[in-house]
Amino acid sequence: MTTNLLLAGGIVVTCAGHDDVLWPGDVLIRNGRIAAIGRDLDVADAERIDVSGRIVMPGLVDTHRHTWQSVVRNIASDWTLDQYLVGLHAGLSRYFRPEDTYAGNLIGALEALDSGITTLLDWSHNLFTPDHTDAAIDALTEAGLRAVFSHGGGAPQWGGVMPSPVPHPADDVRRLRNGRFAANDGLVTLGLALRGPQFSTMAVTSGDFQLARELDLRVSVHVGDGHWGKTKPIHQLNAAGLLAPTTTYVHCNTIAEDELQLIADTGGSASVATDVEMQMGHGWPATGRLLAVGIQPSLSVDVCSSIGGDMFTTMRTTLAVQRATDNHAAVEAGEAPERVKLACSDVLRFATIEGARANGLGDVTGSLEVGKAADIVILSNDTLATTPINNPFGTVVYAAHPGLVRDVLVDGRFVKRDGKLVGVDIDRLRTLAEASRDHVIGSMAGAEIGGRWQPEPKLNLA
């Protein structure tokens, strides 16, 4: 098996700087790592792959996805956040067996790879039992992507009264930390997905965050998604001494400016899930407000039971919404916008290097730099959508889609080549997905496929 590869003659978008492009350029891969980037590299001991005219870029990074929901994809496309909590967390989630969790994670992880996402934070919050936990991790491992498995508990934590008095299942987390995740050097690593003060009492929140510190695990937590932002979650965390640079704050739509500043001052990162936030009633995406306090956000798909699973759409929506917001302010002031404030290259960095940093992997992946893992995407130039390429950043953000993802490498190994996932039986996956879907949806009274099911909202906003 060849471990040395030379990607020759491509349009190399490194994401190491805001506008770093080598055109044409070569990328040398040795033993899974990027060994050299330059022009006309002369290498005798590597398989030469001609990528002339194709964009060669870092693998995309998703910092927050509920991957287990992939077997009920789009069931929630017409739901609000309240309906989602009723229909999924207090509903369908209860009927997931370990094999359904495995199916959801496997299909979701492979979908991510197929669309050029090489690193995924799996915000896994439907873990009824250790068997569910192991099934979720097994699927991520089998898929072959780089992943942070963020243990998020299950129905006891998410399906009852909020704020919940039920602690995170610490025994299951310790089992993992003392077992298969005793080290941090695998493709799949461990993190914690915590409810925080919006969804658990402060006593529980403090205990959960202390668990993360005890086990040296990064934390991802929802804040400011719609109504719950009025509880001032960042102020609560700050008062308890729980803000930290190892935490990613997801959403941030409705938290106040001084809370955003607290995140910046304590070195935290943020994840914006534009599509879901706008659908479900979280409030306007916080992209511009985060940038204003010095936080470079990352991006996430979030609820794959609602939207599609690719990051090209997420980048495009994020850019469009923020540009509209910026331009609207100028128009309201009676001015004509002279220049855009947010560039395509900025948003591509949100979806690559900033995502890697938010996942604690900024030194490993997220950009094409010598010494980093060869997590690489090569886009096809065989279609009119990429003919001709004049602005590589614009091509990626405004024109690309999963169908243009020709090749994907993780750790220098092809997981997708010539437009097809390597070693994946799509028919088997389809059968697995449909069987799991039929069990989960068929087990819940009133649930149905076809697009008509509307769970009855039950949220009390008093």
Image: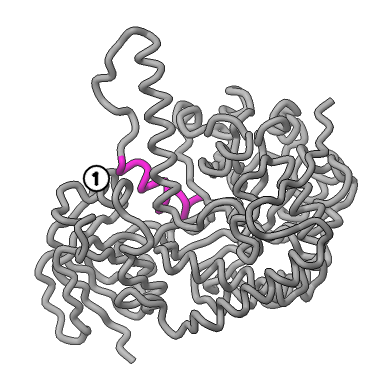
Q: Which residue is mark 1?
A: 19
Q: Nearer the viewer, residue 222 or 443?
A: 443
Q: Which residues are magenta?
A: 344-358
Residue at 74% x, 54% y is 88
Tell me where residue 142 sits by quadrant.
bottom right
Look at the picture and state if 40 lies above or below 448: below
Residue at 28% x, 75% y is 29
Residue at 63% x, 53% y is 451
Q: As drawn, which residue projects farthest toward the bottom?
A: 1
Disc 1 marks which amino acid? Asp
Q: Please state the horizontal and vertical placement of residue 316, each as a whole percent of the image.
A: 39, 44
Q: Is residue 418 magenta?
A: no
Look at the picture and state if 339 lies above or below 1: above
Tell me where residue 419 sits by quadrant.
bottom left
Q: As drawn, which residue projects farthest toward the top?
A: 334
| Direction from residue 279 to residue 426 in the image, left or right | left
